[in-house]
Every structure is written in C-alpha cells, then in structure tokens.
Image: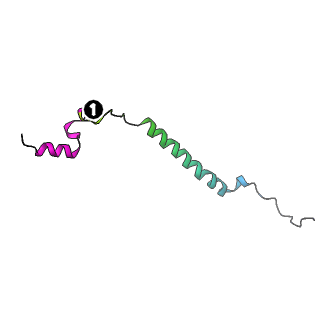
C-alpha cells in the first residue's frame, strides 16, 4: 500500500523544545542532589567521643539549657 501523505518530513525529536524540558528537569535534580551530598560530606562537623567530652569542650554559655538553668537555680 502506498502512502498518500506528501507533506514535509517530520522534524527530529531533539529539535522539539519539550523534549529538552523533559530531559533537563531530572538532570538538574540529579546534579543538585550530587552537589548537596558533596556539601554535606565536606562540611560535616567533627564527632565528639562522649557526652563527657562534649561538656568539657563547651563553654558555659553553650551548655544545654536544662543544665544551665539547674546551675543558676542551685544555691551556693
């Protein structure tokens, strides 16, 4: 059977703007996830070994609120 269509050939799929939106959207999300993971990995804080070590390192103004409140309310 012979086709009766004699119009211009269909444009390539990559020349359609919607295809670029469909491809670029997930690609941007993947790049953002990789960048976020890299920032989290490189910018992580050092771990403290125990709560006792944390108490020795922290200044009095940086201690937990409950500990500071109990210290202020205790008679000398």
Residue 49 in the image, given as x and y percentages of width and height: 33, 32
From the viewer's perspective, is 24 left or right of 36? Answer: right
Q: Is residue 60 magenta?
A: yes
- In the image, residue 31 above or below residue 53: below
Q: Residue at x 10, y 43 (%)?
A: 74
Relative to 50, 76 lies left or right? left
Query: For this rendering, which residue is in front, 65 or 15?
Result: 65
Q: Secondary structure at mark 1?
A: helix
Residue at horizontal 54 percent and vertical 49 percent from the top = 29
The N terminus lies in quadrant: bottom right
Q: Which residues are magenta?
A: 56-76
Q: Main secondary structure of the magenta part?
A: helix
**Tally of numbered discs:** 1
Q: Position of residue 23 (x, y in %)?
A: 63, 52
Tell me which residue sits at (59%, 48%) in the image.
27
Identify the image's colour scheme: rainbow, by chain, secondary structure or one colour: rainbow
Q: Is residue 43 magenta?
A: no
Residue 10 location (% of width, % of height): 78, 59
Residue 57 to residue 15: above or below:
above
Give the farthest residue toward the bottom. Answer: 4
Q: Is residue 35 above or below residue 56?
A: below
Q: Residue at x 86, y 66 (%)?
A: 5
Looking at this view, name the residue that lies furthest to the left: 76
Quarter assignment of residue 48:
top left
Q: Quadrant of the C terminus?
A: top left
Please name the residue that numbered disc 1 is placed on: 53
Q: Nearer the viewer, residue 5 or 49?
A: 49
């Amino acid at each position: 059977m012979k086709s009766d269509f004699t119009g211009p050939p269909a444009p390539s799929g990559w020349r359609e703007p919607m295809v670029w939106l469909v491809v670029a959207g997930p690609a941007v999300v993947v790049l953002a996830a990789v960048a976020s993971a890299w920032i989290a990995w490189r910018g992580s804080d050092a771990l403290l070994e125990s709560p006792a070590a944390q108490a020795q390192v922290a200044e009095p103004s940086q201690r937990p609120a409950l500990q500071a409140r109990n210290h202020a309310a205790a008679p000398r």
